[in-house]
Image (cartoon, grey):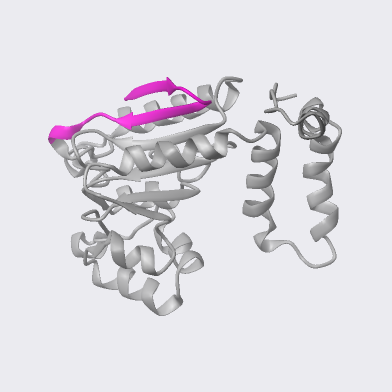
Amino acid sequence: MLVEIVDGGVAVVTINRPRVRNAVNGAVARGIAAALDELDASPEVSVIVLTGAGGTFSAGMDLKGFLTGDMPTVEGRGFGGITEAPPKKPIIAAVEGYALAGGFELALACDIVVASEDAKFGLPEPRRGLVAAAGGIMRLPRRIPYHVAMEIALTGEHYPATRLYELGLVNRVTYPGEALHGALELARTIAANAPLALAATKRVVVESADWSREEMFRKQGEIIGPVFTSGDAMEGAAAFAEKRPPVWKGE
């Protein structure tokens, strides 16, 4: 697992098992979980990018490890150390090559997906006598039309990034080899905004899906209230009035 903090408040987490197409084993899952915990707590980081080394995002669970009892999960965090408990900060998947099975589910656990035009996505678990248990068959029908989600989940076939872009699941499509560059460009744009506002915005978007009409604004207020009384809110207003770039402190 490689972790790098780059410029502009952006960090890159890279799954580094290119010889096995970045298949996820226990060590990878623990590495991702540890990296996300560290980056969530870091004042230097506002946005995280998740990618894979060697031209592949991830081919999913390490089946050889699975046969020996090496489970690619972390207690409380799920598969890959992320699918059950994504980070509080915005996270972008930068996808090259294959994002299959658990690899697709890692991407679905992210907030934004940038993929190269030749990337392939799929949930082939039924072809192996398995089920996409890391959120894929729950998240997918919430992101794309029901019948298309069913087709992807039941056929186990591969689907190109261009098709998923048409469906709204992929945010941006790049030339081959440029997914990380595209993700970093988008990440820097997001990271230029106030970190407290970003985290609160993500939390409302994620959690509000099952709020009733009666509780919507109350629950939103509980989350965003501290943002409006923060030093960053004052800084944002002052910077606007003074016609200068804001200097965020995350407090």
Q: Considering the image in quadrants, where does the N terminus appear?
A: top left
Give the total number of marks visible in the rendering: 0
Q: Considering the image in quadrants, where does the C terminus appear?
A: top right
Q: Is 37 situated left or right of 226 in this image?
A: left
The image shows residue 236 at horizontal and vertical percentages of 76, 32
Q: 234 and 93: which one is in front?
A: 234
User: In the image, what residue occupies the spot 40% across and 69% down?
Assistant: 167
User: Is residue 15 inside the magenta stretch?
Assistant: yes
User: In the image, what residue occupies the spot 29% across and 54% down?
Assistant: 101
Q: Is 76 situated left or right of 221 in this image?
A: left
Q: Residue 76, can we see it?
A: no
Q: Quadrant of residue 163?
A: bottom left
Up-down relation of residue 37 to residue 83 (above or below)? above
Q: Is 18 situated left or right of 170 in this image?
A: left
Up-down relation of residue 199 to residue 115 (above or below)? above
Q: 215 and 236: which one is in front?
A: 236
User: In the image, what residue occupies the spot 27% across and 47% down?
Assistant: 60
- Residues rendered magenta in the picture: 1-19
Q: Residue furthest left?
A: 19
User: In the image, what residue occupies the spot 31% across and 44% down?
Assistant: 179
Q: Residue 62, can we see it?
A: yes
Q: 168 and 71: which one is in front?
A: 168
Q: Is 112 situated left or right of 159 in this image?
A: right
User: Is residue 9 inside the magenta stretch?
Assistant: yes
The image shows residue 90 at horizontal and vertical percentages of 55, 40
Up-down relation of residue 153 to residue 5 (above or below)? below
